[in-house]
């Protein structure tokens, strides 16, 4: 083998190692940029519903009621549908179908906390985050106080998604008709489906 052949072979090995490293880094960059989160931020449509429009006895919104500067309290879009978080949860009461989830252990909630299935937390599409609510199972009368710190459930027939721990406390297996009532404005605690 000639000296020139040896130098050429050495250059090919050297640059192929660099190329492999560069290609690996490029692949990691592209894969990490594919991770998705819900799209938060203002939309071009005005909010069709706020809590004050729903009830005549609602209280005025004050700056202390909710931190609207947080991305999780701004209008957002999931699966092509726009959602408009309410600005005040004072005296909020609603009935509907509850479900539960627990397989997402370790995932990050909308407020940035880590989800823990046995925590006493919930997800709601439009309540200010975080909010403290009482959830009552209407079939057995059992209730639990939870912190709403996530968005969801994104099924039209569902009102609230409870953590597995909260669902067990009120005897919820699968789906159940519930009543939710806010106990105070947004919680200052970031107890997550987590913590």
Image: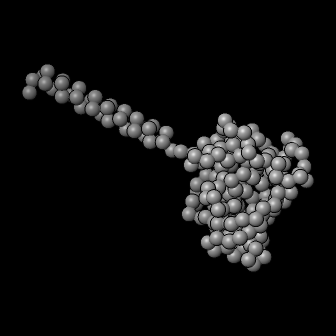
Viewer-nearest residue: 147 or 58:
58
Establish if 22 lies above or below 110.
above
- Left or right of residue 62: residue 159: left
Establish if 123 lies above or below 178.
above
Q: Residue at x 74, y 69 (%)?
A: 178
Q: Provide residue 129's location: percent of width, then percent of height.
A: 74, 50
Q: Provide residue 48's location: percent of width, then percent of height.
A: 74, 45
Q: Residue at x 40, y 35 (%)?
A: 26
Establish if 101 lies above or below 125.
below
- Left or right of residue 104: residue 51: right
Residue 37 sits in quarter: top right
Residue 5 in sight here: yes
Establish if 151 lies above or below 139.
above
Residue 194 in sight here: no
Q: Provide residue 109's location: percent of width, then percent of height.
A: 64, 52
- Left or right of residue 171: residue 145: right
In the image as oriented, which residue stretches furthest toward the left? 1
Q: Residue at x 64, y 62 (%)?
A: 157
- Left or right of residue 62: residue 97: left
Quarter in which the C terminus is drawn: bottom right
Q: Residue at x 62, y 45 (%)?
A: 77
User: How is the protein colored in the picture?
Assistant: one colour
In the image as oriented, which residue stretches furthest toward the bottom? 140
Viewer-nearest residue: 26 or 80:
80
Quarter in which the N terminus is drawn: top left
Q: Provide residue 131's location: percent of width, then percent of height.
A: 77, 54
């Amino acid at each position: 083998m000639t000296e020139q052949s040896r130098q050429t072979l050495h250059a090919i090995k050297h640059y192929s190692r660099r190329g492999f490293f560069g290609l690996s880094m490029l692949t990691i960059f592209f894969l990490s940029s594919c991770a998705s989160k819900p799209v938060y931020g203002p939309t071009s449509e005005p909010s069709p519903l706020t809590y004050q429009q729903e009830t005549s006895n609602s209280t005025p919104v004050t700056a202390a009621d909710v931190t609207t500067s947080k991305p999780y309290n701004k209008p957002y879009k999931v699966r092509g549908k726009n959602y408009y978080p309410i600005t005040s949860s004072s005296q909020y009461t609603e009935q509907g179908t509850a479900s539960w989830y627990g397989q997402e252990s370790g995932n990050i909630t909308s407020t940035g906390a880590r989800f823990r299935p046995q925590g006493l937390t919930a997800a709601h599409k439009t309540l200010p985050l975080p909010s403290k609510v009482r959830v009552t199972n209407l079939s057995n009368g059992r209730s639990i106080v939870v912190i709403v710190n996530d968005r969801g459930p994104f099924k039209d027939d569902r009102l609230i998604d409870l953590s597995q721990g909260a669902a067990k406390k009120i005897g919820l297996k699968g789906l159940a008709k519930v009543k939710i009532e806010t106990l105070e404005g947004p919680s200052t605690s970031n107890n997550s489906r987590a913590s």
